[in-house]
Amino acid sequence: MTNMSAGGEARGDFAGTGGELLGQLFVGYLLTVITFGIYMPWFMCKFANFIAERVTYGPTAKGTVRFKFEGEGGQLFVTFLVGYLLTVITFGIYGPWFMCKLAKFFTDNATVSADDGSVYKPRFDGTGGDLFVTFLVGYLLTAITFGIYGPWFMCKMNKWFSENTKITKNGQDVGGLDFVGEGGELLVTFIVGYLLTLVTFGIYMAWFQVKMIKFNADNTKINVDGHRLGMRFTGEGGELFVMFLVGYLLTIVTLGFYMFWFMAKMLKWQLSNTVVFVEGGAPMGVGMGGGQVQQLGGPPQGQMPYGQPPQPQLGQAPGMGQQPGYGAPPQGGGYGGPPQGGGYGGPPQGGGYA
């Protein structure tokens, strides 16, 4: 691969193993069950940091870029408890404020650092009031148009979360995220993807998912230290199809145990195919990993906070307004379909990072 300092590109990597995922998820789920769900916030935070610490991006002129998540389960527990109670009491009206609280928790507790000592932190500034209006208008227009407005709604949600995610260095603002995707382009991708998925009895789903990932990557921008970084996804539908096929077969043969190694492979595949570059071809001198900044804290990605480990799915087309799942966090990818009540956007469904 071209060295970042010369070619201006960096790729992600995931160093976690299936065995490690098995240990993390088994213990986390067990403690969650034993405590009747109370342990879930601690599980989410532990899993978020587990994923973050095994993700890197490079090479860059600043060295390898690394990630960390420092959120505490106790704080998340209080946020969940208060948020759910207020959402129920207000018949769902408090939902957007709850989502923003969660997005802020996962975003503000993420840290991005480089080998040269540079430390960046994302910050989420979105408010529930703004999100409520965006939701309300988006849902009404989607309902009135019988779902046709859905792609525009998704793009507006991604843009809203991106524009409210800032990047700081030593406490000073040095940039932020942006999303430039258009609903018209996404609508065409949806229509073609659905039709081909139906005609091929689900086989085209892997190619459809890759097209969605590429749409989100191509339209996500990271502005930092005076540079504008773009993203590109180089994975192909054929690769994803084979991975799914082999993964599902081995998962069945091993009575489910291979699922954790399948997840690790999916994460590694997604990250290794996510390229971050400086637009204009300049050398990459900034240490922000593409896409991961969003996941490691915030919206848009979709439906996965850090605490909800990826669940591979193939063969079922996503609903209009949903991101197709590709079996691994981010996030992500996938960047974020409007609400199904949560999401990269729905804070987190997990949060997360890539």
Image: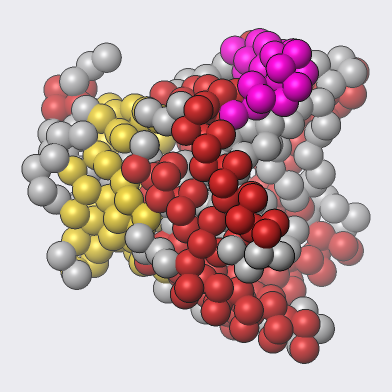
- Quadrant of residue 280 within the rendered picture: top left
Write the residue at 62% across / 83% down. Answer: 82
Please provide percent x and percent y for residue 323.
Answer: 69, 43
Front-lying residue, 350 or 81: 81
Examine the rendering and report whether any part of residue 338 can be seen: no
Does the segment drawn in magenta span residue 323?
no
Residue placed furthest toward the left:
116
Give percent across and percent down for residue 79.
55, 77
Estimate the x, y position of residue 281 in percent, counting from the top left: 24, 29
- Secondary structure of the magenta portion, mostly? helix
Instruction: State the residue at coordinates (64%, 50%).
Output: 30
Instruction: Answer above or below: position of 206 versus 175.
Output: above
**42 is higher (above) or lower (below) than 13:** below
Q: Where is residue 13 in the image (x, y as percent from the top left)?
A: 37, 28
- Say whether residue 242 is magenta: yes
Q: In this view, does 40 lie above or below 125?
A: above
Q: In this view, does 130 lie to the left or right of 172?
A: right
Observer able to see residue 33: yes
Residue that lies at the very extreme toward the front in this rendered image: 34
Q: Residue lying farthest bottom?
A: 89
The stretch in magenta equals 239-260
Q: Quadrant of residue 129?
A: bottom right
Q: Residue at x 69, y 78 (%)?
A: 84
